[in-house]
Image (cartoon, grey):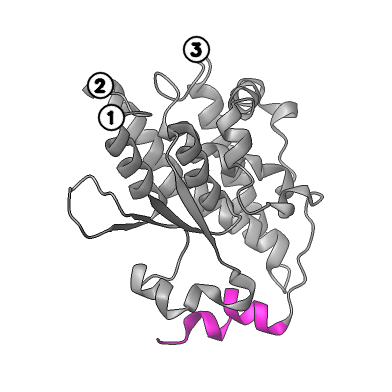
Amino acid sequence: MIDLHTVPTPNGHKISIALEELGLEYNVIPYDISIGDQFKPELLALNPNNKLPVLVDHDPISGSSEPMVIFETGAILLYLAEKTGKLMAQDPATRFQQLQWLMFQVSSVGPLQGQAHHFIRYARVPQDYARERYVNESLRQCRVLETQLQQQDYLAGDYSIADIACWPWLRCLSLIDIHLDKDFPRLHDWFKRIEERPAVQKGKDVIHGWVYQLPPNFKMELDEKTWSYSFGEEQYRQR
């Protein structure tokens, strides 16, 4: 059995989608980061970086009697693909194509689009330069993906963990007023193709993602405690 410690974010939904695609049984252990659950000692014991999701596999591929604990979504996706022999090619040429697009997501798409969301939806002081920079970078990433999908249905060979990693983040683009159907037709087709998968439909809202229903550029008003847990002194307090 697998325990999935998670939150309703693109990173959380990457893993629940993968678990559904692979048909693995798992327990959802939800956290509320608005009240500081991410700093609970039991989570810090699993991930000293206090980020979610975290996967705990009680039947690990190592064969050990001790559970396998994995944080960082790229590592979790690789582990699940390795555990099942699915969602990643065995052919080395295709496998490394898929791995490079997975790395593109974890190093670029998530971090830089996350900054766009922060400066548009959370920053208390308007910062036009930051907004422009990170929205432009998000658009540039879309152009990269659009080009990659010109001659193929998925990012590298068959549907893989690379596609699963990217999809939940592109799902959020409308919140920063980027709309695939208007400017990126191949990327939009890719998005809809994945969205129609039953496992994606089931995994995309594990812990309901109400935030995805917000209008573009919606400004999140956080109370002082929630702000502190997310972006203020409580976030940076030594533990």
Q: Label 3, on which residue?
A: 151
Q: Label 1, on which residue?
A: 96
Residue name at image x 46 percent, y 38 percent:
18
Q: Quadrant of residue 188?
A: top right
In magenta segment, residue 235:
yes
Number of numbered markers: 3
First reached walking from the N terminus: tag 3 or tag 2: 2
Amino acid type, mark 1: Phe
In the displayed structure image, the side of residue 208 where residue 87 appears, left or right: left
Crowding near pointer 2: few (<14 within 10 Å), some, many (20+)?
few
Q: Is residue 81 above or below residue 112?
A: above
Image quadrant where one finds the C terminus: bottom left
Instruction: Provide the residue span drawn in magenta.
Output: 224-239
Alpha carbon of mark 1 to alpha carbon of mark 2: how far?
6 Å
Tell me where residue 117 appears, x and y as whole percent. 65, 56
Which SS class for mark 1?
A: helix
Alpha carbon of mark 3 to alpha carbon of mark 2: how far?
18 Å
Label 1 with label 2: CB-CB less than 8 Å = yes
Tell me where residue 2 appears, x and y as whole percent. 39, 51
Dot label at residue 93: 2
Residue name at image x 34 percent, y 74 percent:
45
Q: In this view, does 238 lie above or below 114?
A: below
